[in-house]
Image (tube, grey):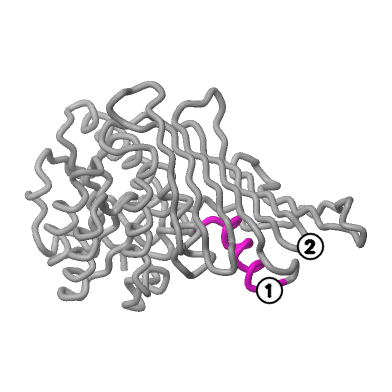
């Protein structure tokens, strides 16, 4: 069965999602909705067969199976809530900048027996899933500290850098650690715009005194996507900018003063492609394993404290 998809928003991220759904054997992009004539013109070139609208309310029941919301952040709640009574919904991160609204969306989803997905892309990356296996195995001893650096991204006006970039770090941490931080501290800086924070330094403390240090910034001459996981017996570097060797593991020798380097093979499939496959399996199996146990609520609760 081929599932029909409606894409709401065809600006920066919408085309990437649309491409991955169209490239899947299980989905077809049937509708693209955007208020911008320029964006609709691009959509017509990219998807000449798709129907184009400026108003998402023209999408009626039984016309599609899945609605993908890639509109500005402030509109996520209204649009997702509107469609969750009729369709399964995927929302670009963050789901909402309000914990109260996220709880409402979860309730609506369950009430109407519809699946609610959020595009936390790194949860579907080969690198993060490899790290998940390393943590579970305990191979390198206890996890002592995590550092993460996420720099350079389009400057937004609808949300600050925490909601835009830290959402990746917080979703990854929640996925890997399966817990919420006990304490959160944040320092937010308005470097180039006096109305919105474009740089943030965050510190999260988890049980067993596990410290996590996060730097997020839109303002950087180079793109940085680096995470360091410091174990008792090794330090794991995860660099998403690397083409092949995204993971490097520096294993301590017996003296602890030198390291041997391992570069494991990981799944290099595009995370968005893996997300699309996950959504297909979830629809078929009528479950949503990754998003169980209040994942969206826990991520949003932490982001609210930091933002």
- Percent position of residue 87, x then y: 19, 64
Residue 119's quadrant in the figure?
Answer: bottom left
- Percent position of residue 162, x then y: 39, 43
What's the residue at 31%, 64% (across, down)? Answer: 297
Name the front one of labels 2 and 1.
Answer: 2
Q: Would you say 28 lies left or right of 204 here? A: left
For disc 1, the marked residue is 137
Q: Quadrant of the C terminus?
A: top left
* Above-or-below relation of 36 to 78: above
What's the residue at 68%, 73% (across, down)? Answer: 137
- Percent position of residue 206, x then y: 52, 63
For disc 2, the marked residue is 233
Does dot 2 land on a helix, a strand or a loop? loop
What's the magenta region? 124-138
- Percent position of residue 91, x then y: 29, 54
Q: Quadrant of the N terminus?
A: bottom left
């Amino acid at each position: 069965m081929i599932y029909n998809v409606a894409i709401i928003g065809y600006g920066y991220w919408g085309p990437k999602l649309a491409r991955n759904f169209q490239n899947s054997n299980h989905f077809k992009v049937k509708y693209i909705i955007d208020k911008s004539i320029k964006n609709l013109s691009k959509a017509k070139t990219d998807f000449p067969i798709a129907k184009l609208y400026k108003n998402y309310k023209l999408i009626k029941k039984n016309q599609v199976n899945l609605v993908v919301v890639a509109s500005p952040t402030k509109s996520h709640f209204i649009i997702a809530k509107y469609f969750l009574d009729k369709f399964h919904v995927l929302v670009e991160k963050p789901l909402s900048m309000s914990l109260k609204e996220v709880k409402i969306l979860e309730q609506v989803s369950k009430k109407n027996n519809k699946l609610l997905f959020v595009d936390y892309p790194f949860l579907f990356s080969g690198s993060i899933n490899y790290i998940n296996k390393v943590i579970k195995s305990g191979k390198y001893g206890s996890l002592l500290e995590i550092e993460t650096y996420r720099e350079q991204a389009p400057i937004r006006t609808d949300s600050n850098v925490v909601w835009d970039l830290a959402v990746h770090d917080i979703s990854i941490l929640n996925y890997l650690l399966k817990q919420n931080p006990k304490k959160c501290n944040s320092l937010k800086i308005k470097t180039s715009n006096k109305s919105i924070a474009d740089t943030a330094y965050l510190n999260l403390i988890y049980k067993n005194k596990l410290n996590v240090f996060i730097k997020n910034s839109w303002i950087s001459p180079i793109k940085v996507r680096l995470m360091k996981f410091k174990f008792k017996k090794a330090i794991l570097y995860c660099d998403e900018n690397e083409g092949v060797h995204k993971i490097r593991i520096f294993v301590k020798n017996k003296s602890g003063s030198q390291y041997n380097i391992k570069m494991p093979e990981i799944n290099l499939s595009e995370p968005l492609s893996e997300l699309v496959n996950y959504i297909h399996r979830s629809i078929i199996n009528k479950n949503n394993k990754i998003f169980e146990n209040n994942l969206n609520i826990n991520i949003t609760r932490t982001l609210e404290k930091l933002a």
